[in-house]
Amino acid sequence: MDCTQIKSILERELSPEHVDVKDDSKKHKHHPGNTGGGHFELVVVSQAFEDVSAIERHRMIYTLLSMPRPEIHALAMKLYTPLEWKKQHASD
C-alpha cells in the first residue's frame, strides 16, 4: 500500500476537507523491529470526526485501512474536525 492508495481510501470513505499522506519510510529503514513495512503520517480533516473521541477516530482509520497490514509498519495520525483544524491554524 502506498500514499496514493491510502489517500484514495480516505477520500472515498471520509469525504475529507483536507487529507495529506506522507511516506516517511526512508527515515526508519534501519530501525530495530522494522519488518520492511512503510512508515506513514496522515493528516485528515473530516466532518466524520465530529463528536468522535480521539481513540475512536484512530479506530476508524485502522478499520478503513484494514489494519494491521504487513506493508504498513507505523502510522502516525493527526485527525481533526473542520472546526478543530480551523482553530489549529488560526494563527497561520
Image (spheres, rainbow, N blue to C red):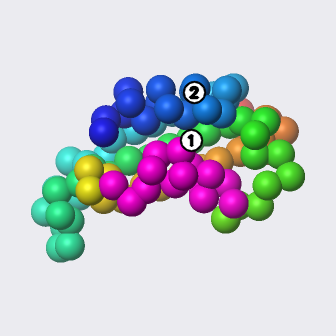
Mark 2 or 1: in front is 2
| Amino acid tagged 2 | Glu
Badge 2 element: helix
Q: Main secondary structure of the magenta part?
A: helix
| Image quarter in which the N terminus is found | top left
Q: Measuring from the top left, give residue 2's x and y in whole percent.
A: 31, 35
Q: Measuring from the top left, give residue 82's x and y in whole percent.
A: 79, 35
Q: Is residue 64 magenta?
A: yes
Q: Quadrant of residue 12?
A: top right
Side of 61 where 47 appears, left or right: right
What is the crowding at mark 1: few (fewer than 14 residues within 10 Å), some, or many (at least 20)?
some
| Image quarter in which the C terminus is found | top right
Is residue 89 or residue 80 the one in the foreground? Answer: 80
Side of 46 where 75 appears, left or right: left
Q: Measuring from the top left, give residue 86's x and y in whole percent.
A: 79, 36
The residue pinned by badge 2 equals 11
What is the crowding at mark 2: few (fewer than 14 residues within 10 Å), some, or many (at least 20)?
some
- Depicted 29 relative to depicted 18: above or below: below
Q: Is residue 74 visible?
A: yes
Q: Measuring from the top left, give residue 46's x and y in whole percent.
A: 72, 36
Side of 18 where 30 appears, left or right: left
Q: Which residues are magenta?
A: 56-69
Residue at the bottom extreme? Answer: 32
Residue located at (18% from left, 73% from top): 32
Residue located at (38% from left, 27% from top): 4
Question: Disc 2 versus disc 1: distance between alpha carbons?
Answer: 12 Å
The answer to whether the residues at label 2 and label 1 have Cβ atoms under 8 Å apart is no
The residue pinned by badge 1 equals 43
Q: Is residue 90 visible?
A: no
Badge 1 element: strand
Residue located at (39% from left, 60% from top): 68
Side of 19 where 24 appears, left or right: left
